[in-house]
């Protein structure tokens, strides 16, 4: 079974400003600091964070497109893959809405084996909505590292 879930929020900053967070490893650092229940550790095993990398929870950034402002992470091992999933990807997009406004969108794409279809209920967009809300607050209330969830 294949499925997708997505949510988006409007952020009152230019798209290029939002992409400075979403398009870099800074996103993970902000989340580790402010939402440790979602991401508690980031280990860069390959690259410098600006190119595809592997993190401690075995995700790899398979797309980082600065022109389209799209970043896609795919789980390589562990997590939901241990529960019968054959694919689990998270896509962040920053979409220009106006000169001073953008839309941030998170999409989960997943595929689960038929015999494990009940485990599809574990897929939740809510952690990524929390991340988008955190980044929106970080961007609109000042990004001096003092944002709070």
Image (tube, grey):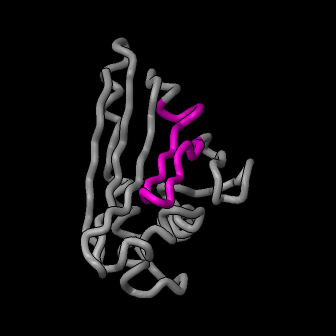
Q: Can you name the residue that lies furthest to the top here?
A: 115
Q: Where is residue 42 in the image (x, y as percent from the top left)?
A: 64, 56
Q: Which residue is drawn at 39% across and 86% down?
A: 141
- Occupied quadrant, residue 137: bottom left
Q: Does the magenta stretch include residue 13?
A: no
Could one spot residue 55 in this view of the protein? Answer: no
Q: In this view, does 53 lie to the left or right of 8?
A: right
Q: Does the magenta stretch include residue 64?
A: yes
Q: Position of residue 4 (x, y in %)?
A: 29, 37
What quarter of the picture does the N terminus occupy? top left
Q: Residue at x 34, y 13 (%)?
A: 114
Image height of 88 relative to 105, above or below: above
Image height of 119 relative to 31, above or below: above
What quarter of the picture does the C terminus occupy? bottom left
Q: Is residue 91 left or right of residue 65?
A: left
Q: Residue at x 38, y 32 (%)?
A: 110
Q: Which residue is drawn at 38% across and 56% down?
A: 93
Q: Can you name the residue that lies furthest to the front here?
A: 67
Q: Position of residue 39 (x, y in %)?
A: 53, 56
Q: In this view, does 3 lie to the left or right of 15?
A: left
Q: Which of 59 and 21 is in front in this view?
A: 21
Q: Which of 56 and 3 is in front in this view?
A: 3
- Occupied quadrant, residue 127: bottom left
Image height of 39 relative to 82, above or below: below
Q: Where is residue 90 in the image (x, y as percent from the top left)?
A: 43, 45
Read off the magenta span. Answer: 59-80
């Amino acid at each position: 079974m294949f499925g997708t879930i997505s949510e988006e929020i409007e952020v009152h900053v230019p798209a290029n400003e939002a992409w400075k967070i979403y398009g870099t490893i800074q996103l993970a650092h902000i989340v580790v600091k402010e939402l440790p229940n979602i991401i508690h550790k980031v280990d860069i095993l390959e690259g410098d964070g600006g190119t595809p990398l592997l993190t401690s929870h075995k995700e790899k950034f398979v797309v980082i497109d600065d022109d389209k402002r799209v970043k896609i992470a795919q789980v390589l091992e562990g997590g939901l893959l241990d529960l019968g999933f054959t694919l689990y990807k998270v896509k962040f997009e920053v979409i220009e809405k106006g000169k001073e406004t953008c839309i941030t969108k998170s999409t989960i794409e997943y595929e689960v084996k038929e015999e494990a279809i009940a485990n599809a209920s574990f897929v939740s967009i809510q952690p990524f909505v929390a991340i988008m809300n955190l980044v929106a607050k970080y961007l609109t209330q000042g990004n001096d590292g003092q944002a709070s969830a």
